[in-house]
Image (cartoon, rainbow, N blue to C red):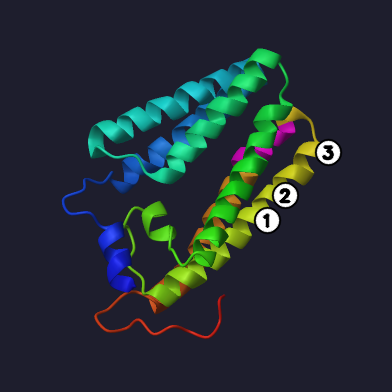
Amino acid sequence: MSEEVDAAAAPAGKKRLSPGLKFVLEMGPLVLFFIANQKFGIFYATGVLMAGVVATLAVSYAITRHLPAMPVVTAILVLIFGSLTFFLQDETFIKLKVTILYALFGGALLGSLYFGKLLLPAVFDSAFHLDDAGWRKLTWRWSLFFFFLAGLNEAVRRVVDTDVWVNFKVFGIMPLTLAFALAQIPLMMRHEARGGSGEEADSHF
């Protein structure tokens, strides 16, 4: 199975974004969303976010000639829920988008395990090479973390106003995600793929 994963995750000759540019493209729309909300309010900011995710996809495709699944799904949900927010003038929709997005990611990862597939190699765009046991453990961890974020966002959006929620999205969710990602480094180092090391570990976590 590891050979199938490697083959699917690392197409020959596929161009990649530099880490710096990838970070800018991922954070750019969110930063613009935050600034626009501070200056003009949530509805203007929602329009800026929609334009931002489309622009980042266009730049990514122009450089790499492919579109990773996760940014595409994110952009689709931003456009759908952003349009509802903008045209119905109801900020509830853009807040719900975050809950639905993370729940969808968590469900997709768990579903991939149920059907014996591994989605994370594609999500990480071949940036890491782990054995199968490592990918399965990492999939469990990320899926549970996404469900946690979905629940956290749902709880926060119900008890705070829109400006506080925007601050939470930028200065709460993003640092939590970064801290969680960094906490996975020891697991990834233990399961880094090296020619013959692919035995499956007992624990799923």
Q: Residue at x 54, y 54 (%)?
A: 108
Q: Which residue position holds label 2?
A: 152
User: Is there CB contact under 8 Å for labels 1 and 2?
Assistant: yes
Q: Which residues are magenta?
A: 164-170
Q: Residue at x 51, y 24 (%)?
A: 50
Q: Position of residue 62 (x, y in %)?
A: 25, 31
N-terminal of the pair, mark 3 or mark 1, is 1
Residue 148 numbered tag: 1
- 168 magenta-colored: yes
User: Is there CB contact under 8 Å for labels 2 and 3?
Assistant: no
> Relative to residue 51, is residue 63 drawn left or right?
left
Amino acid type of the residue tagged 2 in the rendering: Leu
- 193 magenta-colored: no
N-terminal of the pair, mark 2 or mark 3, is 2
Farthest residue toward the right? 159
Residue 159 numbered tag: 3
- The kind of secondary structure element at disc 1 is helix
Q: What's the CA distance linking mark 1 and mark 2?
A: 6 Å
Amino acid type of the residue tagged 1 in the rendering: Phe
User: Is there CB contact under 8 Å for labels 3 and 1?
Assistant: no
